[in-house]
C-alpha cells in the first residue's frame, strides 16, 4: 500500500470519527416521531458538481442541495472562500470526494466534521476496494481521484449517499433508497452506452489525448489508451520534452484528434496540434471535454449523466466511431461550457 493511500485513509478516519455523533438528527428520543423533527428542506453542501448531482437525485425534495465548486472550476487548485466555509459550517450534511481531489479544502472539512455533523466521502466504498483504485506510475505515489469517469465505479457512490441521508433523516429512508435504486439504473444505461460507443471506434484510433490525466478510469473501463499532457493534478507542469514526446506519439499513430478540457487551460493541447501539423500530420481539436467540473447549471451537460454523455459522444465521433450527434438521450446541445 502506497503512502498516498495511507494518508487518504487516515483523513477519512479522522473525518468519520468527528462525524459519528452527527450521523442522525440529535433528539432526546430515538423513536420515529422524534426523528421526524428534521427541518425540511434540510441543507446539504457538496464540494464538486458530480457529487451534487448524485445527492439531488437521491434526496429529492427533502433537501436543499448546493455545490461549492462550479462549472469550469478546477478542484485541484480551488481554495475555499470565507463564504464557502460558512456554507460548509452551517450545512446539515456535507459530502466530498474523499480521494484528495479537494486537497486545499481538507483542513476545512476536518474542522466542519469536528462539530459533529455528518461529513461523508462518497468514495468510501471505492476506497475499501484496493483493486479498483488506480495509482499513477509517475513516481508521485498519488492515487487517481477521477473515479467518476468510470460510470460503473461511480455507481458505488450512490448507496453511500443514500445511507448517509437515511441516517440523518430516517423517516424518509425508504424514499432515499428507492431514489438511489432508480438513479443507479439510469447510470447503468449510461455505462452501457459508453462502452458500446467507444467500442465502435476503429481499434487503431482508440487513443484519447487530453490536457491532464483525468480519464484513466474511463480508459480502463472502455479500452481507450489515455495520454494526458499534465499529471493527475493540474498543479503539475508539462515540460517541452513532454510535449515533444507526445507530438511524436500523435504523428506515429496518426491520431486524428486531441481534446481540450473545460476546466484546464488549452494552450498545451493547441501546442500539440501545431507541432503535429508542422510535421505533416493533420490533427484537430476534437472538442472540449468535461473533466473535473460539469457543464452550465440548469443544462443537460450540467448533470452527471449529461456530462458523461457529452464526453463519450464527443470522443466517439471525433475518433471515427459511431454515436448520435445529440447523444444517448438526444439532449446534447453541442456546446461545452
Image (cartoon, grey):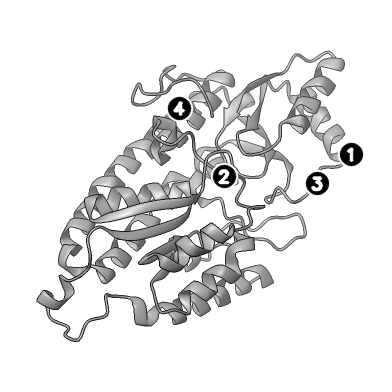
| Dot 3 or dot 4, earlier in sequence | 4
Camera sees residue 104: yes
Q: Which residue is mark 1?
A: 241
State how far apart marks 2 and 3 are (Cα).
Answer: 17 Å
* Helix, strand or loop under label 2: loop
Is 91 left, or right, of 257 in this rendering?
A: left
- Of badges 2 and 4, nearer the viewer stands 2
In the rendered view, does 65 fall on the left or right side of 2?
A: left
Task: State the quadrant of the N terminus.
Answer: bottom right
Q: CA distance from mark 4 to mark 1?
A: 33 Å
**Mark 1 or mark 2: which comes first in sequence?**
1
> Mark 4 falls on what kind of element?
helix
Instruction: Provide the residue designation for mark 3.
Output: 237
Q: Residue at x 58, y 38 (%)?
A: 72
Secondary structure at badge 1 equals helix
Other-residue count near label 3 (Cα within 10 Å), few / some / many at <14 / 14–19 / ≥20: few
Residue 208, image x and y in percent? 63, 32
- Closer to the camera: disc 4 or disc 1? 1
Find disc 4 in the rendering and name its residue.
197
Question: Camera-side residue: 172 or 246?
Answer: 172
Residue at image mark 2:
292
Q: Is residue 163 above or below residue 193?
A: below
Amino acid at each position: 500500500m502506497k503512502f498516498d493511500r495511507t494518508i487518504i485513509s487516515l483523513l477519512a478516519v479522522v473525518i468519520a470519527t468527528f462525524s459519528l455523533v452527527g450521523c442522525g438528527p440529535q433528539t432526546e428520543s430515538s423513536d420515529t416521531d422524534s426523528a421526524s423533527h428534521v427541518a425540511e428542506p434540510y441543507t446539504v453542501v457538496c464540494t464538486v458538481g458530480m457529487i451534487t448531482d448524485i445527492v439531488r437525485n437521491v434526496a429529492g425534495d427533502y433537501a436543499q442541495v448546493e455545490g461549492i465548486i462550479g462549472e469550469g472550476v478546477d478542484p485541484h487548485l480551488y481554495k475555499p472562500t470565507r463564504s464557502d466555509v460558512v456554507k460548509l459550517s452551517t450545512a446539515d450534511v456535507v459530502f466530498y470526494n474523499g480521494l484528495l481531489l479537494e486537497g486545499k479544502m481538507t483542513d476545512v472539512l476536518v474542522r466542519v466534521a469536528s462539530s459533529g455533523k455528518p461529513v461523508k466521502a462518497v468514495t468510501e466504498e471505492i476506497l475499501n476496494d484496493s483493486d479498483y483504485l488506480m495509482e499513477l506510475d509517475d513516481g508521485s505515489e498519488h492515487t487517481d481521484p477521477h473515479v467518476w469517469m468510470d460510470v460503473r465505479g461511480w455507481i458505488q457512490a450512490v448507496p453511500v449517499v443514500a445511507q448517509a441521508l437515511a441516517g440523518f433523516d430516517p423517516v424518509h429512508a425508504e424514499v432515499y433508497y428507492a431514489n438511489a435504486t432508480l438513479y443507479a439504473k439510469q447510470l447503468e444505461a449510461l455505462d452501457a452506452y459508453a462502452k458500446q460507443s467507444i467500442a465502435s471506434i476503429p481499434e487503431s484510433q482508440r487513443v484519447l489525448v487530453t490536457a491532464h490525466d483525468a480519464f484513466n478510469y474511463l480508459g480502463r473501463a472502455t479500452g481507450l489508451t489515455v495520454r494526458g499532457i499534465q499529471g493527475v493534478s493540474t498543479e503539475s507542469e508539462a515540460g517541452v520534452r513532454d510535449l515533444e514526446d507526445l507530438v511524436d506519439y500523435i504523428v506515429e499513430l496518426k491520431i486524428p484528434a486531441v481534446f481540450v478540457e473545460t476546466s484546464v487551460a488549452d494552450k498545451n493541447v493547441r501546442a500539440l496540434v501545431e507541432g503535429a501539423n508542422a510535421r505533416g500530420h493533420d490533427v484537430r481539436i476534437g472538442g472540449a471535454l468535461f473533466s473535473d467540473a460539469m457543464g452550465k447549471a440548469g443544462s443537460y451537460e450540467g448533470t452527471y449523466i449529461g456530462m458523461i454523455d457529452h464526453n463519450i459522444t464527443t470522443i466517439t465521433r471525433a475518433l471515427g466511431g459511431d454515436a448520435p450527434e445529440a447523444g444517448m438521450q438526444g439532449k446534447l446541445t453541442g456546446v461545452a461550457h
